[in-house]
Amino acid sequence: MKKVIKIYALGFLYTILVSLVIAMHVQANGLDDPMDVPDEVIEISEELGNEYNICPELIQAICYVESRFQADAENGECIGIMQVSRRWHKDRMERLEVTDLTDMRQNMTVAVDYLAELAKDGEDLEVPLMRYHGETNIMDRLESGETSWYVKKVLEISALLEEQHGK
């Protein structure tokens, strides 16, 4: 009986330790709490993730980095939760029958469709994410061992979310 209690106690302590490490990691990296993903974002990312064969946590991480989950976020020409540019994605929006980039589902649909197109060559995620972010000199940078802050942040948050979801 004492062994069982010790095992449960160790498991409990381990859970607390992991939670503290994640919290310290999030705080040390200047992040808000990315583990608090809105239910609608989870639902849409899981649907689109299944449809496009993209990890839902990666989609959620992009939503967080791009807009902190704000459906009406704007930055220059980029709009919505995943910061889609109407100018660059006009044809894609027409094909997908998207009319409102401040609508969370519509914005995420355009963005995930684009990300799936970028990732279709089976490259590591760094290349499609850098392209998604509109970065230049990608191959030269990667050959020199440089990864952008954007890729690091998205992959870091995606990993934290996967851990939270038991993956």
Image (cartoon, grey):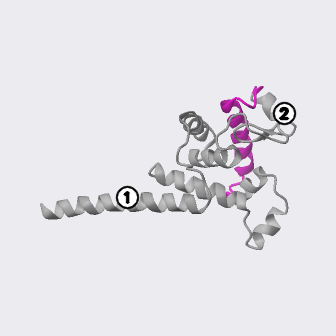
Q: Position of residue 92 (x, y in %)?
A: 80, 34
Q: CA distance from mark 1 to mark 2?
A: 49 Å
Relative to 89, is 166 above or below?
below
Amino acid at dot 1: Ile
The one of 155 and 18 positioned closer to us in this rendering: 18
Please rate how many residues cluster around mark 1, counting C-alpha atoms within 10 Å: few if below 14, some from 14 to 19, many from 20.
few
Q: Which residues are magenta?
A: 97-125
The amino acid sitting under disc 2 is Asp
Relative to 151, residue 141 above or below: below
Q: Residue at x 14, y 63 (%)?
A: 2
Asked if marks 1 and 2 touch (Cβ < 8 Å), the reply is no
Q: Which structural element holds mark 2?
A: helix
| Residue 1 at least partly seen | yes
* Residue at x 61% of width, y 61% of height: 29
Percent of width and height locating residue 88: 85, 40
Q: Residue at x 77, y 71 (%)?
A: 143
Q: Nearer the viewer, residue 159 or 91?
A: 159
Q: Mark 2 highlights which residue?
A: 91
Q: In terms of image quadrants, where is residue 9?
A: bottom left
Q: In what element is the residue under mark 1?
A: helix
Answer left or right for 123 relative to 165.
right
The outermost residue toward the right is 87
Q: Reply above or below: 121 against 67.
A: below
Quarter of the view holding residue 8: bottom left
Across and down, in percent, residue 13 comes to 32, 61
Total marks placed: 2
Disc number for residue 40? none
